Amino acid sequence: MDARYDLAGRTAIVTGGGGGLGRGIAAALRDAGATVELWDAHAGRLAEAAAELGVGQRLVDITRADEVDAAAEAAFAAHARIDILVNNAGILGEVKPIWETDPANFETVLRVNLFGTYLVSRALIGRMRLQAPRAGLGGHPIRGHVVNIASIQAKEGMALASAYSATKAGMVALTKSTAKEVARDGVIVTAVTPAAAETAMAREISAERRADILSRIPMGRFVEIDEVARMVLWLSSDECSFSTGGVFDLSGGRATY
């Protein structure tokens, strides 16, 4: 993929960096010139992704506040500043009607997808807003970009996915709230709502579930990882300077609001 944005001199953190979508986003950021650090709780997957991409890595369980705070401190010590944060880590959880779900599984999905995003945002945005700004378009200061990877299910919900849908909707609300808090600090916070992509998460579902999801997408296909990565590239660049709090659709026409 050709880099259309110059991110040279920028440092980026991608959570869930060992997964397929995280790797694709990290590769796009790297190819645009950014120094990239992957965060993931799975040591083997993380090491493989970092070696494949030639980028940094940090073993972090984002559901633990102490680990996240330590990782944030170490990242700023190593790089002096963090310009880009992509909150990508997430899990699907059970595919069952709510009355059949296991409360422990529901809580796990909440902790990874929403609470984890909160902890990482809390640790990094607080530091981002205090770092030296760059001059953005029109000379307006920019201190960083945060991109939250939500889901089309955040807008629509989906049967048999109450935990996943609820957490992704929570990420959208968190995006809007956080964006307002740092709007005058030069930190741009946005979210994307992709349809399903061809990742390990998509392979967890049954053939019937896959057909149901495809039937809801007017384009009749899943989103490509590179298509998500290209959107994240723009949202991570200084070209995105006045869209804070925005939620950007990548649903193939499934949701147009």
Image (spheres, helix red, strand yellow):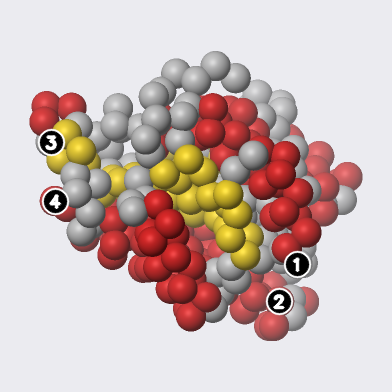
Give above or below for 42 relative to 204.
Answer: below
On residue 94, the disc is: 1
1 vs 4, front mark: 4
Q: Type of residue at label 4?
A: Arg
Amino acid type of the residue that numbered disc 3 sits on in the rendered structure: His
Residue type (three-letter) at the residue carrying disc 1: Glu
Q: Outermost residue toward the right?
A: 207
Q: In which quarter of the image is residue 253?
A: top right
Give the distance between the C-alpha atoms of the residues marked 2 and 1, in whole angstroms.
Answer: 7 Å
Q: Residue 184 carries which label?
A: 4
Q: Mark 3 points at which residue?
A: 140
The mark closer to the camera, 3 or 1, is 3
Within 10 Å of the Cα at label 3, are there few (<14), some (14-19), or many (20+) other Cα atoms? few
Q: How many labels does the image show?
A: 4
Q: What element carries label 3?
A: loop
Name the residue rendered at 28%, 65% in the picture: 126
Q: Locate the C terminus by quadrant.
A: top left
Which of pointers 3 and 4 lies earlier in the amino acid sequence?
Answer: 3
